[in-house]
Image (cartoon, helix red, strand yellow):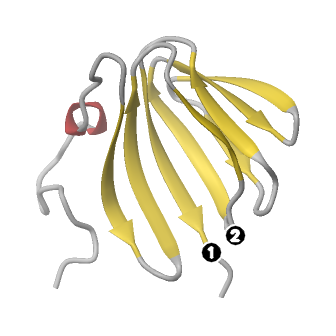
Amino acid sequence: MAYIKNMDHEKVLNLTGEVEVAKGQVVSKTLAQNDAVSITLFAFSKGEEIGGHDSEGDAMVQVIEGTGRFTVGGTEHIVHAGEVLIMPAKIRHAVYAVEDFKMLLTVVFPA
């Protein structure tokens, strides 16, 4: 049984090639989802967004290509490729694509 899905196992992969930007869309690819953790790849077309929401778990975003703007509790953060931002549980946050960008989202839920 594989716990991580939708990607080849035992093969070196480039995350940026695992999800493609589609004009006017936010594309997502779920890699793992259970009661403890959620791991999802996202590709945002420039100008696309995910509006304000919160989560029961801590959310860590790792931008793997381009630049995104993350608003966490009313504070804006510009995050570039290679950078990470942790958004605390139960704090309202939103994502906006300053340019085409891709990110890996890991949410760790309370036990």
Q: Which residue is mark 1?
A: 109
Q: Is residue 10 left or right of residue 4?
A: left
Q: Residue at x 27, y 77 (%)?
A: 3
Viewer-side residue, 84 vs 45: 45
Residue 73 location, x and y as percent? 86, 42
Q: Secondary structure at mark 2?
A: loop
Relative vertical location of residue 101 with respect to residue 11 in this rendering, above or below: above
Query: Quick one: which residue is furthest to the right in this view?
Result: 74
Q: Is residue 68 above or below residue 34?
A: above
User: Three-letter amino acid code at disc 1?
Assistant: Phe
Q: Could you tell me residue 61's position as x and y percent?
A: 57, 44
Q: Secondary structure at mark 1?
A: loop
Q: Which residue is mark 2?
A: 56
Report the mark closest to the observer, 2 or 1.
Answer: 2
Compared to residue 2, the image places residue 6 above or below, namely above
Mark 2–mark 1 contact, CB under 8 Å? yes
Give amino acid for label 2: Glu
The residue that appears at 49% across and 11% down in the rendered structure is 99
Q: Residue at x 88, y 34 (%)?
A: 74
